[in-house]
Amino acid sequence: MKPILLGSVSLLLAGAASAQDYGYSGDTGPENWGGVCATGIQQSPIDLTMAIEADGIMPAIAWTQAETVELTRNSLNFTAHTDAGALILNGVRYDLIQFHFHSLSEHTVDGKAFPLEVHFVHASDDGDLAVVGMFYEEGAENAELAALWNAIPAEGETGTVSGLDLTNFLPADHAGFRYSGSLTTPPCSEIVAWTVLAEPLEASSAQIEAYRGLFGDTARPVQPHNRRFVLEND
């Protein structure tokens, strides 16, 4: 990815991660987010329901093993930075730049929330974003989460994970949902092509509680569809 583009996208996402601008409760909670967050008509997340079946809509995901993943943290969440992969969507290449987690899940399926959701953020040369989301349900301990959780740094510091195979974050079945939406944190820019995979991964109850113990509730409530179509490939 071009350095200039990476810088501009990084600034956008850094703005979205500023703990000084927003929070998840009280005076800085989602109901008080202003700007596009309040006035936009293609906001995310949404309830994935009443989907229209469609073929050939899912991106071609090509993630690899990351030599090093760098973790940064603020008071709200942590972010894992890596360029180990890309995806092709509608003939356009989007390069992987980072991933992060939310609890509970931000998206719901027919009104059902999951205990954890991960978002893999990709950027195109034009500065548009394609985000792939996966759910976690309570089950067996997850080795990839264990490696990440062990490396989460103190606020304002960085941590690293070596040799993380990003393909292990993908479920066996890549079927799921597609729709047009936004960042789920301020500035809530409506530049995101969303893919949310339907088959959940597993995480242990201890891992789920460990995340919540550090960060609490990091999920924006679902937003209105506003006549948007949700497509489903199964």
Image (cartoon, helix red, strand yellow):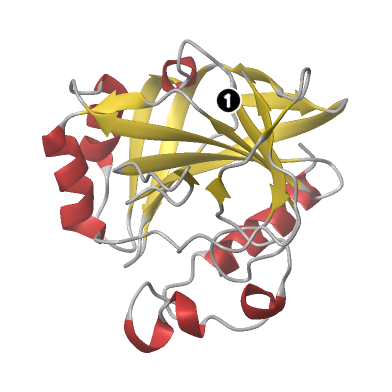
Question: Does residue 54 appear left or right of residue 69 in this picture?
Answer: right
Q: Quadrant of residue 12?
A: bottom right
Q: Position of residue 100 (x, y in %)?
A: 44, 45
179 is higher (above) or lower (below) than 54: below
Q: Residue at x 24, y 61 (%)?
A: 216
Q: Position of residue 189 (x, y in %)?
A: 70, 64
Helix, strand or loop for disc 1: loop
Q: Residue at x 29, y 31 (%)?
A: 137
Mark 1: give few (<14), some (14-19) or many (20+) Cα within 10 Å: many
Image quadrant containing the N terminus: top right
72 is higher (above) or lower (below) than 74: above
Q: Nearer the viewer, residue 31 or 81?
A: 31
Q: Quadrant of residue 118?
A: top left
Q: Quadrant of residue 16?
A: bottom right
Question: Label 1, on which residue?
Answer: 84
Q: Position of residue 205 (x, y in %)?
A: 14, 35
Please state which amino acid type lies under the numbered disc 1: Ala
Q: Residue at x 40, y 41 (%)?
A: 117
Q: From this viewpoint, is residue 21 visible?
A: no
171 is higher (above) or lower (below) than 98: above
Query: How many marks are shown on the rendered structure?
Result: 1
Question: Does residue 168 appear left or right of residue 197 in this picture?
Answer: left
- Among all residues in the image, which is located at the extreme top? 172
Q: Position of residue 51 (x, y in %)?
A: 65, 36
Q: Residue at x 49, y 85 (%)?
A: 32
